[in-house]
Amino acid sequence: MPKLPPKDYIQTVSFPDEISLRPIGVVHSPYKERHGTPRQSHLRTVPPDYQPAIATIELFSEMVPESALKDMDGFDRIWVISWLHLNHHWNPTVILPRGPRIRRGTLATRAPHRPNPIGLSALKLLKIEGLVLYVEGIDLLDQTPVLDIKPYVTYCDAFMDAKCGYVHDMESSQELEVDVFGTHRPEVGEG
């Protein structure tokens, strides 16, 4: 059979000026305001008595049938892609809540104020009941729209030797977020 020439699909569809998304679900979280809500779903260094919050994600039956969750219960963690709906403005630089009080490029941070306010959370999946996912370590406010859910897969989602720029320096100093844990630096061997 003769080999066909490759097809160039890029030229057949014009680049979108706008993208329209519909939520597939909603977060039911104990966090009702930004202050006191964790800034990450999981941190390596936390006080020994820290208990991550448990929340639920309710999927909308008109968007997602139950069969879409088939085999999801075998995963310990999931990626939740959300729309940070309370963030309407952004700046190209931000000052982080921990570390040196210097401006960093927004795209070099996990700041929620972004050109497109998309959130990414790696949550622990506790159980699934119908179209409700029970998760631990939520870093999202109550009523946050969910855009998608994907399984966390260690062979392609964890790069233990990856460089993390200035974040590595903050982790090395074990500086914790003040508004979540209070002013606390763990002692050697703690945390």
Image (cartoon, rainbow, N blue to C red):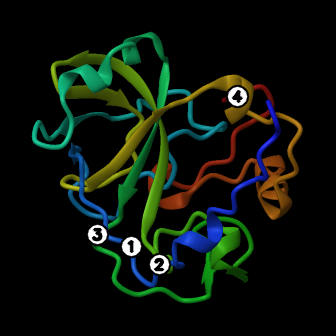
Question: Which residue reaches farthest left?
Answer: 62
Label 3 or label 1, whichever comes before in sequence order: 1
Give the SS element for disc 4. loop
Mark 1–mark 2 Cα distance, whole angstroms, equals 7 Å
**Circle number at residue 19:** 1
* Residue 185 visible to the viewer: yes
Q: CA distance from mark 4 to mark 2?
A: 50 Å
Could you tell me which secondary element the residue under label 2 belongs to?
Answer: loop
Residue to which mark 4 is pinned = 190
For marks 4 and 1, the one nearer the N-term is: 1
**The residue under label 2 is which amino acid type?**
Pro
At 82% from the left and 37% from the top, the residue drawn is 2
Asked if residue 184 is positioned above or below residue 64 in the image, the reply reads below
Q: What is the secondary structure assignment of the residue under circle 3?
A: loop
Please provide percent x and percent y for residue 171. 77, 49
Residue 16 numbered mark, or none: 2
For marks 4 and 3, the one nearer the N-term is 3
Left or right, residue 121 beside residue 130: right
What residue is drawn where x is 41% and y is 29%?
A: 51
| On screen, residue 139 above or below 92 | above
Q: Is residue 3 toward the left or the right of residue 80 in the image?
A: right
Tell me residue 38's x, y (percent): 44, 51
Locate residue 85: give its quadrant. Answer: bottom left
Residue wearing tag 3:
85
Indicate which disc, 4 or 2, sits on the residue closer to the N terminus. 2
